[in-house]
Amino acid sequence: MTKKFDVIAIGTGTAASAVAHRCRAAGWQVAVVDSRPFGGTCALRGCDPKKVLVGAAEAVDWARRMKGDGIRAEQLKIEWSELMRFKRTFTEPVPKNSEAEFSKAGIATFHGRARFVGRSMIQVGEESLEGRYVVIAAGQKPADLKIPGVELLTTSEQFLELDNLPSRILFIGGGYISFEFAHLAVRAGAHATILHRGDRPLQAFDGDLVEKLVAHSRNLGIDVRTRAPVTRVTATGNGVGVWAGTARGEERFDADIAVHGGGRVPAIHELALDAAGVAFTPKGITLNEHLQSVTNPSVWAAGDADGSGPALTPVAGHEARVVSTNLLEGPSTRPDYSVVPSAVFTIPPLAGVGLLETEARSRGLEIDVRSGDMSGWYTSRRLAEPVAAFKTITDARTGRLLGAHLLAGHAAETINMFALAMRAGLTARDVKNTVFAYPTAGSDVAYML
């Protein structure tokens, strides 16, 4: 017998959960479906557990930097197995708690892989579900690198579950995953290599600051190679061999494990979208401005599966609010991606919001660019930070903030102040005239404008 609902959400992460709970609170009959443990990528396999591990690396790194300045850190180290046990205190309760919250709210839960068998009909194992609407929020999965031996790679999810940290780790790709995990690995005593196919990694961030981060990474002992596309992966007696094209021809890099850091794609290709007449591309489901399928008005998408905005957890939450509002009140709300801060949790972190300098110039905008080295500033010296820099971009005519880019220990928090100022339409003068608590990283903002 087919079970009928007002909304069926595919996924149980940030976007799916928000849509499900809001629609249920409005009195709708709601179901959620997930083939994996309830809770989604961020809470279980992504940003949250990663930040727990990075936090330990930050603590160790700070103490080591302060050696000779009042801190004795000779015996300080990361005990990986203990750190992983600590990490699991965050992740292990999530599936049970998440399902309990759904049940308490009166949301029906289904475990298994969802497949469309009609325009709004879903098959989950032996269960048939029909919804007035279906919201796809199934997250992402590792991209297919299309190289021989790809099955030998360790995924980012598997890395986050390692009971023991190998001594030689190679990362394929120069994005968030590779840089964050490489910085974590070297602080835990491993040797890390990053192979990136392009001219420079972390393309979404300011090029000048990325250059400083790459140089700092190399100084830490991370072997960062650019213009080194991986061509194949082979098994060796005690690990893997990764072959890459370099200026010297094809080279082999040996490691205990090789981690897939070469990007992620929407996890939508096993949903049988053709059966529902849902158009999609490798970047995600093809949507209109309201996040509704252009070919099937019963289907909506939010989060990483839609491919509309940046693949970030706060964006998933924002899109969930848009989708649920449009479902409950009619399609009138659109997502706003104009001010979305993001950060790479290296040590120190790299963060940015708004326009890059290159983007502003390509648009022909009249801009005022301020940049500088902050390693000699009080905030950095107090933390013994050897690397810290900033770049801000303002409209030369109006003084409004257009972009901010930071590389510093406080960057991931301070970037939110710039985002708030930009969202509120504040000018550089408005920010400079603000009285900040001192001494704080926030008080440095005025000197960046």
Image (cartoon, rainbow, N blue to C red):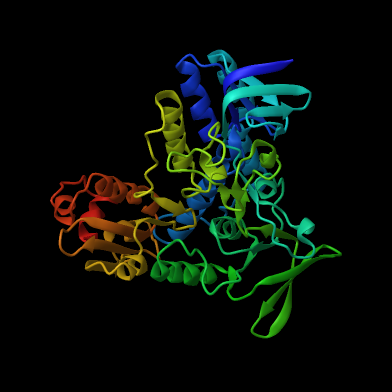
Is residue 318 toward the left or the right of residue 84 in the image? left
Is residue 447 toward the left or the right of residue 327 in the image? left
**Which residue is pictured at 60% across the width and 45% down the height?**
279
**Which residue is pictured at 48% across the width and 53% down the height?**
345
**Which residue is pictured at 56% across the width and 72% down the height?**
198
> Could you tell me if residue 360 is visible in this image?
yes
Q: Nearer the viewer, residue 189 or 306?
A: 306
Residue 379: quarter of image: bottom left
Measured as percent of width and height from the top left, residue 188 is found at 61, 55
The residue sitting at the bottom extreme is: 248
Q: Work out whether 189 lies above or below 303.
A: below
Measured as percent of width and height from the top left, residue 217 is found at 52, 67
Residue 128: quarter of image: top right
Measured as percent of width and height from the top left, residue 52 is found at 54, 43
Measured as percent of width and height from the top left, residue 46 is found at 58, 44
Q: Nearer the viewer, residue 76 or 131?
A: 131
Q: Quadrant of the C terminus?
A: bottom left
Q: Nearer the viewer, residue 245 or 259?
A: 245
Residue 358: quarter of image: bottom left
Q: Quadrant of the N terminus?
A: top right
